[in-house]
Amino acid sequence: MLQQTTVFLLLAIAGLALLYGSANTIDNPRGQQPPNIVLLFCDDLGYGDLHAYGHPTIATPHLDQMAQDGILFTQFYSASPACTASRYALLTGRYPVRSGFDWVLYPKSERGLHSEEHTLAEGLKAAGYRTGCFGKWHLGSTQPGFLPLQNGFDTYVGLPYSNDMIPPKWPDIALLSGNDTLGMNPDQSLLTGLYTQTAIDFMREDAPSPFFVYLPFAMPHVPLYPGKDFEGQSRAGTYGDVVEEIDDAVGRIRAALEEAGMAENTLILFTSDNGPWIIKGADGGSAGHLRDGKGSTWEGGMRVPGIACWPGTIAPGQVQRTPANTMDWYTTLLGLAGQNIPEDRIVDGGDLRPLLRGETLSDRPFFYYGPGNQLQAVRKGPWKLHRITSSQTGLDYFDGKLPLLFNLNEDPGERFDRSEQFPEVVTELQRLMDEQMKATDRVGTFWD
């Protein structure tokens, strides 16, 4: 009943969007300050883990309100079902296969985000933005060159790795401020509150320039550590406690923007790096009605929550069913800042500004990269083709049958293989995958 109520409310107010008059335009006139940007990036949050996406017991009123005030994407994707690769794609606008490193980096990994990459932070900084990162980095070790301050951020507070990379398997984990160590093995129940408050302090700094806040939360990646004010408060257990604290953080950030009179010139984005870690049981979250989770190229591994809100500019109450992905924010945000997209490399992200204006986008393929950044599947329009499948659960859902074809509009849970009924679609999608593999093989990476 909660799921139906939320969806009906969003659909009902969607009609009001047609009557909504925007005070600003998506493309700011030349000479006018571009918008502040707040990018909230969860870790392992599943498609089904928010009330706005149908969870019956996790209470997320602030995210529900954010969706009502802006756009809720029903077909939003991460570019990878793994932590490091998804962050690379978000900050470079490029598929993770172009990175030159594998899925996940570790404390002793020798590679990281290459200095030749042009990050979103670097592009926004060139446009005059103050740039701050508060949270999980996970794009390289503490070796010189791999940390946020060497990749476009003015300020950084956070952990360089995942919150499970702790002793005895891994070295002591450092909480960093810039390139310096604030402390070792911090109390993780304080992390969400710390990251949120440092982000708010950064936004409140008295400065004439716009700001870019990138807040990659440490959770709900396991181990779960809700703050003391949230522990035991959710009907959905510890996982729910953690998600509800993140929801509270969203409310605090929006309230701070309102109090400072900055809400109408701030675009807030909320999404996740990949699907839920379902092999962790009750601590791993839910993909809702989607199949599988983190580590797989099934929909549950890569389709994630996506919400965008910009009061006075984005019309409220929109439910957007056009497929989009995290790489698109790279191109979109640089465009909003008046920056050109780099022309000396391939940028895979598209421009979502037409969607933010309430317009439509032309159809385009989306490629699913699995373990080892291996191309496993492709989607175009409603059709998705799997040529390879994987799952951390070890399950083989279709007894080894490949390829598999699904109509995601009719069957988002990927239950009914349609490959035998539509062989011409299989042929066309196989061609797209072949072309993509040849193109990435030719280009190589900066690490070559």
Image (cartoon, helix red, strand yellow):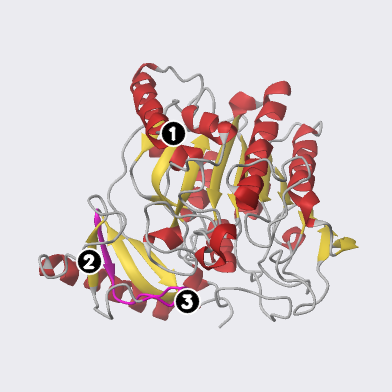
Q: Single out the mark in the foreground, 3 or 1.
A: 1
- Percent position of residue 262, x then y: 67, 26
Q: Residues within 10 Å of mark 2 (few under 14, many from 20)?
A: many
The answer to if 96 sits in the magenta stretch is: no
Q: Which residue is mark 2?
A: 405
Name the quadrant containing residue 321. Answer: top left
| Observer-nearest of 430 and 32 | 430
On the question of residue 24 being in view, the answer is yes
- Percent position of residue 267, x then y: 57, 35
- Percent position of residue 12, x then y: 35, 23
Label 3 to label 2: alpha-carbon separation: 20 Å
Q: Which residue is mark 3?
A: 371
Element type at marker 1? helix
- Relative vertical location of residue 298 with respect to residue 23 in this rendering, above or below: below
Magenta extent: 382-395
Which badge, 3 or 1, is on the more N-terminal residue?
A: 1
- The amino acid beneath tag 1 is Leu
Element type at marker 3? helix
Label 3 to label 1: alpha-carbon separation: 36 Å
What residue is drawn where x is 50% and y is 69%? Answer: 96
Q: Which residue is mark 1?
A: 2
What residue is drawn where x is 76% and y is 61%? Answer: 159
Left or right: residue 204 compared with residue 34: right
Which badge, 3 or 2, is on the more N-terminal residue?
A: 3
- The amino acid beneath tag 2 is Leu
Name the quadrant containing residue 263. Answer: top right
- The amino acid beneath tag 3 is Pro
The answer to if 388 sits in the magenta stretch is: yes
- Relative vertical location of residue 213 with respect to residue 218 in this rendering, above or below: above
Tell me whether circle 3 and circle 2 mark residues in contact (CB < 8 Å).
no
